[in-house]
Image: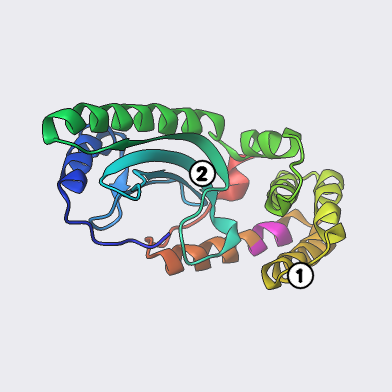
């Protein structure tokens, strides 16, 4: 999800609307892009005012787990997808941008409530139905279960990851991580250390400020 320059009137209008609704919640804009971040140390709320093929905007809000240790923003849990709405004139588009920003603020608040602490995250991730082709769902559930001290559930989810046919290099890499986590699942301190290293690395790659994680304190 690259951060790209956008000099259209749409960006100015969207940014102004986002500052009205998102900045008071503590979200930060990524440079001068359409992306806004709600930073919770080991996970992010991500808001993107998605650009359509022509002038205008949509809205995409979700959560990202930083234990994935990647160099780009991602949506691992979707909260809302809306639009896109076209830009015709400033008078026509400004109310749409304000409504998108209002929706974004509401969904960010809902994500904060849903993922208020690690046990809530673990309950959500381990209870949602398995989706065919969504290997990361089981991977995330396995990590969360191990972090809250439930190695049996953690291993069940990680074993599903390991049973997938690795059809692409990223799947091979994910299974290597799953295999490592499966081995250490009963050792909560080891899992916490693994996640801490991954989160620290991911934050560095994303250009986020370093933090002192207190994952165990959330349980």
The relative height of residue 16 versus residue 113 in the rendered view (above or below) is below
Q: Position of residue 98 (x, y in %)?
A: 24, 29
- Residue 40: within the magenta? no
Q: Which residue does the numbered mark 2 point to in the structure image?
A: 63
Q: Position of residue 44 (x, y in %)?
A: 47, 47
Give the residue at x 35% y 47%.
52
- Residue 193: within the magenta? yes
Q: Which residues are magenta?
A: 190-194
Give the residue at x 37% y 61%.
209
Secondary element at image label 1: helix
- Nearer to the camera, 182 or 165: 165
The relative height of residue 45 versus residue 159 in the rendered view (above or below) is above
Q: Position of residue 137 (x, y in %)?
A: 70, 47
- Nearer to the camera, 41 or 82: 82
Q: Position of residue 97 (x, y in %)?
A: 25, 33
Real-space CA distance between mark 1 and mark 2, rounded to the nearest whole angstrom: 24 Å
- Quadrant of residue 6 within the rendered picture: bottom left
Give the residue at x 25% y 46%.
55
Determine whether, in the image, residue 111 is placed left or right of residue 85.
right
- Quadrant of residue 99 within the rendered picture: top left
Magenta stretch: helix, strand or loop mostly: helix
Mark 2 Cα shell of 10 Å, populated few (<14), some (14-19), many (≥20): many
Q: Which residue does the numbered mark 1 point to in the structure image?
A: 176
Disc 1 or 2, which lies upstream in sequence? 2
């Amino acid at each position: 999800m690259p951060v790209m320059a956008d000099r259209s009137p749409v960006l100015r209008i969207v940014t102004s609307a986002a500052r009205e609704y998102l900045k008071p919640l503590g979200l930060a804009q990524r440079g001068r892009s359409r992306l806004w971040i709600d930073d919770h140390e080991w996970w992010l709320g991500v808001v993107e005012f998605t650009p359509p093929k022509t002038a205008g905007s949509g809205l995409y809000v979700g959560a990202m787990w930083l234990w994935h240790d990647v160099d780009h923003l991602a949506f691992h849990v979707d909260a809302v997808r809306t639009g896109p709405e076209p830009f015709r004139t400033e008078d026509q588009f400004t109310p749409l941008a304000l409504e998108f920003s209002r929706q974004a603020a509401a969904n960010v608040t809902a994500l904060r409530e849903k993922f208020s602490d690690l046990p809530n995250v673990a309950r959500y991730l381990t209870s949602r139905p398995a989706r065919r082709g969504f290997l990361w769902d089981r991977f995330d559930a396995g990590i969360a279960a191990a972090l809250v001290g439930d190695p049996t559930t953690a291993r069940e989810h990680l074993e599903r990851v390991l049973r997938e046919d690795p059809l692409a290099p990223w799947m091979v890499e994910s299974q290597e991580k799953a295999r490592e986590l499966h081995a250490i699942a009963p050792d909560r301190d080891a899992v916490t250390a693994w996640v801490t290293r991954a989160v620290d690395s991911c934050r560095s790659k994303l250009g986020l400020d370093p933090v002192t994680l207190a994952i165990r304190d959330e349980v």
